[in-house]
Image (cartoon, grey):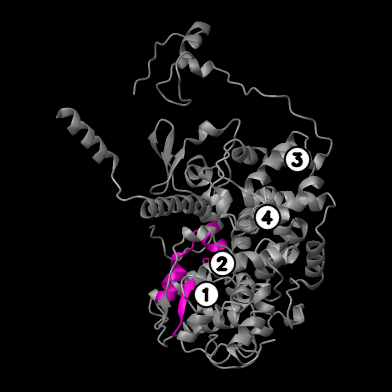
């Protein structure tokens, strides 16, 4: 589960000033930890981006993590990482 | 990653480049793709005669197609209205599809306005939608059911299509500057601070406590508990000089001009009393101040907004509040929709409850509670009280399976319908601030509403300890 229980007063100026984006690929940037966003220049036509205060990006990111934890807790007998699966496949191929 | 400087250009190069799939914006795309002028193919737009509808669909078409063209429908089973009605016309999917049909000229606002009553604006659908949960933050484009419902309701009002109870409710709110919540208290400006009788709270100042209409006039034990908790922790605050309704309910029901007028009054009044920080105990007010007001005022809205339950959790963590009186109850916690789903605030209330000695706490996690609701929001209890009652009964039924005697909420607007539903199942409904105050040894006073006061056994004032007042000072009103 996400852990973000500190007091967070709402301040307009803060909420409309996300951290400086850092490029992570040709088409994606990152702002907050665990928050990845499409390069905004790719959404300048057809479908424009919405106004997103910081709390909303963080809420969605945290909710996604909580939801995935919830799904695993309710529907998975065990949770394996992709790297474990790949290692298993490679081991089978080597055998 | 290789950028080729000497790539061929011209029509042949572009045709060659288009034979392969590509991701727009990639640095190693063939340079000729920069010349590619992509187009969106589709039927010619329908010319809509009504300028309001034209403007409306222009603003909301993309948000609506975002739902209509994906059609996941994960929203249906988390929707509290869908759970109790199974009416396909009252689903988030239908609310978006209608906008698409309006854009095509197949529907007019008069055809569908009444359907949009059936939404509590709890936000479950838009959070559970994969277009929010899995991609919303990535694209900065998420499902906007609440905004779409509010916009359709506003279009209806602007077009002269009114829901009778909402029209009366908002007219009376306009006359009295507060919502006409049902109860014993006379709803008027001179009574809005009656709940604070005997608490010796100043007016104005840098920090003020904003109390919603339901708590100020009906469930007065809640603001009394909050005020006395903050006093015990040494927090300095006052009350508003001339508090009006936050305007949120009017905005939710489509009466946007009225909502903006009320918001303007409150902001001006805060300025007049030197207020820089607003403490908010009600999740609905919290939405108004952190979503509506910023939209209305932009950068002008420089007021800091603090949710009381977050502040209280902080004060407990810092040791400025220490709950020590055991409260022998078996409880579960109802995540208010506007905190859990719409704001992602669910940890602090649990932190507060876990600090109270004596409680046996059967918790239900926040994700499971995305599908829980009291039915008390979005104007639903005003226009369709029978639907609110059914949704509340559904929520109480879930609490009953946990064999609890108390359902704790953190939202005054949920507590009236939940109390009424809980009464039949012998489940008491208590506000988190009321129960914390009890554990802090505070004699709260005030009223827990008709059901709460009756269950407390003294016919008013929530005395006897069970309701969290422990004192029996009688109703503040």
Who comes first in sequence, dot 3 or dot 1?
A: 3
Q: Is residue B345 magenta?
A: yes
Mark 3 and mark 4: Cα distance apart in space = 19 Å
* Residue topped by disc 1: B407
Who comes first in sequence, dot 1 or dot 4?
A: 4
Q: Residue B64, percent across and down?
A: 64, 40
Residue drawn 38% across the image and 79% down it: B319
- Marked residue chain, label 1: B
Who comes first in sequence, dot 3 or dot 4?
A: 3
* Residue topped by disc 3: B55
Task: Please determine whether, in this image, residue A27 is positioned above or below residue B207.
Answer: above
Q: Of tags 3 and 1, which is closer to the observer?
A: 1
Please tell me in which quadrant of the rendered image residue A11 appears: bottom right
Mark 1 and mark 2: Cα distance apart in space = 10 Å
Mark 1 and mark 4: Cα distance apart in space = 36 Å
Residue drawn 40% across the image and 21% down it: B28
Who comes first in sequence, dot 3 or dot 2?
A: 3
The verdict on a common chain for dots 3 and 4 is yes
Mark 3 and mark 2: Cα distance apart in space = 39 Å
Q: Residue B453, percent across and down?
A: 62, 86
Who comes first in sequence, dot 4 or dot 2?
A: 4
Q: The residue tagged with tag 4: helix, strand or loop?
A: helix
The verdict on a common chain for dots 3 and 1 is yes
* Residue topped by disc 2: B395
Mark 4 and mark 2: Cα distance apart in space = 34 Å
Q: Which residues are magenta?
A: B328-354
């Amino acid at each position: 589960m996400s852990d973000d229980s500190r007091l967070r007063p709402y301040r307009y100026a803060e909420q409309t000033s996300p951290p400086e984006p850092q490029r992570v690929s040709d088409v994606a940037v990152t702002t907050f930890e665990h928050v990845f966003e499409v390069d905004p220049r790719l959404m300048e036509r057809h479908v424009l981006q919405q106004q997103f205060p910081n709390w909303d990006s963080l809420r969605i990111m945290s909710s996604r993590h909580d939801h995935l934890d919830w799904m695993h807790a309710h529907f998975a007998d065990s949770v394996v990482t992709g790297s474990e699966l790949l290692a298993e496949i490679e081991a089978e191929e080597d055998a | 990653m290789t950028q080729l400087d000497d790539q061929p250009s011209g029509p042949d190069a572009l045709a060659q480049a288009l034979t392969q799939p590509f991701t727009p914006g990639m640095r190693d795309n063939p340079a000729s793709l920069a010349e590619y002028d992509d187009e969106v193919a589709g039927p010619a737009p329908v010319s809509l005669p009504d300028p309001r509808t034209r403007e409306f669909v222009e603003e909301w078409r993309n948000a609506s197609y975002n739902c209509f063209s994906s059609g996941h429908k994960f929203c249906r089973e988390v929707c509290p209205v869908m759970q109790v009605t199974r009416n396909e016309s009252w689903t988030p999917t239908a609310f978006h599809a209608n906008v698409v049909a309006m854009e095509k000229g197949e529907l007019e606002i008069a055809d569908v306005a009444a359907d949009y009553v059936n939404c509590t604006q709890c936000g479950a659908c838009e959070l559970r939608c994969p277009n929010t949960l899995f991609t919303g933050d990535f694209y900065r484009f998420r499902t906007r059911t609440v905004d779409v419902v509010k916009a359709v309701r506003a279009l209806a009002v602007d077009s002269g299509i009114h829901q009778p109870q909402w029209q009366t409710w908002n007219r009376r709110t306009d006359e009295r500057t507060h919502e006409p919540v049902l109860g014993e208290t006379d709803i008027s400006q001179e009574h809005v601070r009656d709940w604070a009788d005997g608490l010796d709270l100043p007016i104005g100042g840098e920090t003020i406590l904003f109390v919603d209409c339901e708590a100020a006039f009906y469930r007065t034990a809640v603001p009394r508990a909050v005020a006395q908790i903050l006093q015990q922790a040494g927090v300095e605050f006052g009350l508003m000089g001339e508090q009006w309704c936050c305007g949120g309910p009017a905005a939710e029901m489509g009466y946007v001009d009225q909502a903006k007028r009320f918001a303007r009054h409150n902001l001006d009044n805060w300025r007049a009393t030197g207020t820089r920080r607003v403490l908010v105990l009600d999740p609905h007010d919290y939405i108004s101040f952190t979503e509506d007001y910023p939209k209305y005022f932009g950068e002008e809205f420089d007021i800091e907004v603090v949710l009381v339950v977050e502040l209280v959790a902080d004060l407990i963590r810092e040791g400025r509040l220490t709950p020590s009186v055991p409260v022998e109850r078996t409880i579960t916690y109802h995540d208010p929709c506007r905190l859990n789903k719409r704001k992602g605030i669910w940890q602090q209330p649990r932190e507060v409850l876990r600090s109270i000695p004596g409680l046996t706490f059967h918790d239900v996690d926040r994700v499971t509670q995305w599908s829980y609701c009291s039915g008390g929001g979005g104007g639903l209890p005003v226009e369709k009280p029978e639907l609110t009652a059914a949704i509340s009964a559904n929520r109480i039924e879930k609490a009953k399976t946990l064999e609890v005697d108390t359902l704790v909420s953190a939202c005054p607007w949920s507590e009236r319908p939940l109390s009424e539903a809980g009464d039949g199942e012998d489940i008491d409904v208590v506000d988190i601030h009321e129960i914390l105050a009890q554990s802090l040894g505070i004699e709260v006073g005030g009223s827990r509403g008709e059901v709460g006061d009756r269950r407390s056994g003294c016919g008013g004032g929530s005395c006897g300890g069970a309701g969290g007042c422990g004192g029996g000072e009688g109703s503040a009103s």
